[in-house]
Image (tube, rainbow, N blue to C red):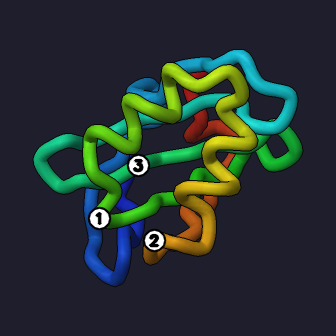
């Protein structure tokens, strides 16, 4: 784990907590139910994880169960929740 800024606070984010998903656009997602944080890594930017705050667990589950995770994300999550970009160095990312 490494320290990163998550919505203005220094937090620890373990990149191994992200789970690969079947999507043409999204590479992996993770969810912190205690803090209602959704983490999304896109295929085109493997060293960047986006952190979305205030995402209800039900929304996360619905995204996982949807036919198209990418479409669900863009309609129901992207630009609807406060978010922040977390950048990693190549050696920090565990895949």
Q: In this view, does 6 lie above or below 20?
A: below
Calculate the distance from the C-alpha at mark 1 to the C-alpha at mark 2.
Answer: 7 Å
Q: Would you call the spot at circle 3 few (<14 residues within 10 Å), some (14-19), or many (20 or more)?
A: many
Q: What residue is drawn where x is 34% and y is 38%?
A: 31
Mark 2 closeness class: few <14, some 14–19, many ≥20 residues within 10 Å = some
Local SS, label 2: loop
Residue that badge 2 annotates: 81
**Residue underneath mark 1:** 54
Residue under label 3: 38
Q: Nearer the viewer, mark 3 or mark 2?
A: 2
Residue 91 image offset from top left, x and y in percent = 64, 37
Q: In this view, does 33 lie above or below 51?
A: above
Comparing 2 with 28, the one in front is 28
> Is the residue under label 2 in contact with that under label 3 (CB below 8 Å)?
yes
Q: Which of marks 1 and 3 is nearer the N terminus?
A: 3
Instruction: Say if mark 1 contacts mark 3, CB within 8 Å.
Output: no
Mark 1 and mark 2 residues within 8 Å of each other at the beta carbon: yes
The outermost residue toward the left is 34
Above or below, 50 against 24 in this view is below
**Quarter where residue 14 is shown:** top left
**Measured along the vertical axis of the image, is residue 5 above or below residue 47?**
below
Q: What element carries label 3?
A: strand
Compare residues 88 and 65 and report the one nearer the observer. 65
Indicate the position of residue 85 as horizontal and vertical percent values.
58, 68
First in residue order: circle 1 vs circle 2? 1
Q: Quadrant of the N terminus?
A: top left
Q: What residue appears at the point 63 percent right and 19 percent down from the top-left corner?
A: 21
Gap between marks 1 and 3, in whole Å?
A: 8 Å
Q: Position of residue 33 (x, y in %)?
A: 19, 42
The image shows residue 83 at horizontal and vertical percentages of 49, 71
């Amino acid at each position: 784990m490494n320290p990163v800024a998550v919505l203005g606070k220094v937090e620890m984010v373990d990149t191994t907590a992200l789970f690969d998903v079947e999507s043409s656009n999204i590479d992996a997602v993770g969810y912190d139910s205690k803090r209602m944080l959704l983490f999304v890594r896109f295929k085109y930017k493997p060293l960047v994880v986006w952190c979305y705050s205030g995402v209800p667990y039900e929304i996360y589950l619905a995204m996982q169960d949807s036919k198209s995770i990418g479409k669900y994300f863009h309609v129901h999550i992207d630009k609807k929740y406060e978010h922040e970009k977390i950048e990693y160095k190549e050696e920090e990312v565990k895949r």
